[in-house]
Amino acid sequence: MSIAAKTVSGVGLDLERVRADFPILQKTVHGKSLVYLDNAATSQKPRPVIEAISRYYEETNSNVHRGVHFLSEQATGQYEAVRKTAQEFLNAADSKEIIFVRGTTEAINLVAQSYGRAHVRAGDEILITEMEHHSNIVPWQILCDERGATLRAAPINDAGELDIDRWERLLSPKTRLVAVTHISNALGTINPIRRIVELAHRRNTPVLVDGAQAVPHLKVDVQALGCDFYAFSGHKLYGPTGIGVLYGRSALLEEMPPYQGGGDMIASVTLEKTVYNKLPYKFEAGTPDVAGVVGLGAALDYVRGLGIENVGAHESAVLDYATSAISTISDLRVIGTAKDKAGVLSFTMGNIHAHDIGTVLDQEGIAVRTGHHCSQLVMQHFGVEATTRASFGLYNTKEEVDRLVRAIEKVREVFA
Amino acid sequence: MSDLRDLYQEVILEHCKAPRNYRGSPAANLKAEGFNPLCGDRFTVYLTMDGDSIRDVSFQGTGCAISKASASMMTQSVKGKSAAEAEKLFESFHRLVTGLGHCDRDAELGKLAVFSGVSEFPARVKCATLAWHTLQAALEGKQETTTE
């Protein structure tokens, strides 16, 4: 198995070695070797991540920020070291701007419930796009319902790109916050975040970026982007499930009320009054997922070791190859043809339902996502109920794309 | 491919391409909408009852081959039956597609037996039963149901 990855730094990825790092890729499914093309849902985990979690439980397990004993200090040290790694990964100005959460969904809910409830009033507006994942729609709906505010969604064009002129026209003095995905999970569209931030900041409106799909594919620099909040999940970045990061600019986080109350987020408690802990602990109530954080740290180190630029270049080579390979299949319609795109190939095929396609591909050992991808606004825009989505990770190869194409031909045989 | 052919039997594919009783029904006195939020499948089932008996049944909507063929064959199977007989047939059908097998008190499934392959594909059980759940909701006077 070999593949020539486009190289940026001149190093590229050693695919054979990289694939050997992921034990699950050795698996067979229905008697065929697994082709895992559901990376936008969750990525597989390399051995260093799996081992870091086991090692933590075998050698370090203890509660953090609490004990004076040896293990607690070690656990705290490892936990806080990952905060530093995450800060470097996003190029945040300060490690106190890194809040550990369960994932992107919790990060967005935190901002909606903390920043949102403190700032959004009746008659205000929150602006999102039509290509948002439900996790960047529903938390704002809940907030707007509670506050008597209005949620607006800027339209996308038929390539699946944000219509930036209409976006700008929807920004108004009433817009209290804009929340936008960096890369669409259903379409692969990369949004022009710097431009979006510039337009919003001109009106003193803060910007939240849903980075769940972006961090696995491209270098994210929150200071260069200029965004106020940036959220991502560990599990889409080759780390464990149940752990993620909210980056927030410290000026905003400082004045935001806590999201949840509990242990670790307090400085002192009396029945009359509680003084909250400083950042980032104010937003980390209760015993955190220490093992998850340790696993996330291993994942960040793993990706940094390969070089995110190398990963991105390889994936775009595979995506280009796949896009051109499936374009030869008749009746196949690619949903999402943005000029600036990463990681995702979503398609429909004549009248054949995505679920039927998914079942046939599964029998061939190929894992894809079928359905609305938690993006029903996108499905409505394109007038489809569901799509089949192949999404690529750093370990996918052109040979696997060839197997996908052959399996799609089999779909046609079954439903001829 | 043999496994796939167990699921996608010719009869099923044929019903998917040319679903029977695929129409709205202005005369219907009961109807319900069924929705599977997981995949977006959505069917409306229309019933024209004559007392306790299903005089006419039809459906409309969108879904995968399994859900559409199942809806189509369901309309053929329950037409002319009483509400209780239709419920009993659903019970037997449910046992079939979930792999619980046939028991003595089961209703006669007839052509519906072609759905036996579904039991090997647990993710598709909801597809096969969506129309049936919708029928049940209509008979019970509910307007909406989901299989999630």
Image (cartoon, rainbow, N blue to C red):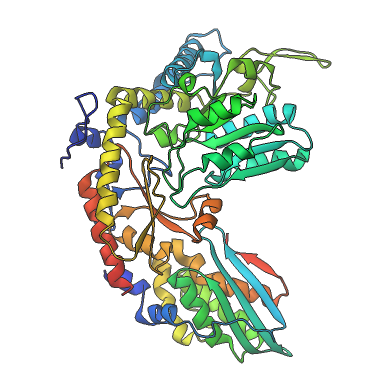
**Left or right of A150 on screen, residue A1:** left
Q: Is residue B80 above or below residue B119?
A: below
Residue at figure coordinates x 61%, y 74% from the top left = B44
Q: Taking the image as drawn, is residue A34 in sight? A: no
Residue lying furthest right:
A272
Residue at figure coordinates x 35%, y 22% from the top left = A301
**Percent of width and height locating residue A20:** 22, 35
Q: Taking the image as drawn, is residue A167 in sight? A: yes
Q: In this view, does A147 lie above or below B96?
A: above
**Left or right of A172 on screen, residue A31:** left
Q: In this view, does A125 lie above or below A256?
A: below
On-image quarter of the C terminus of chain A: bottom left
On-image quarter of the N terminus of chain A: top left
Residue B30 found in image quarter? bottom right
**Percent of width and height locating residue A390:** 35, 50
Residue A271 found in image quarter? top right
Residue at figure coordinates x 64%, y 70% from the top left = B33
Q: Which of A185 and B14 is in front in this view?
A: A185
Picture mark count: 0
Residue at figure coordinates x 51%, y 12% from the top left = A94
**Percent of width and height locating residue A72:** 51, 13
Residue A46 found in image quarter? top left
Q: Nearer the viewer, residue B33 or B5?
A: B33
**Percent of width and height locating residue A342:** 37, 40
Q: In this view, does A156 lie above or below A258?
A: below
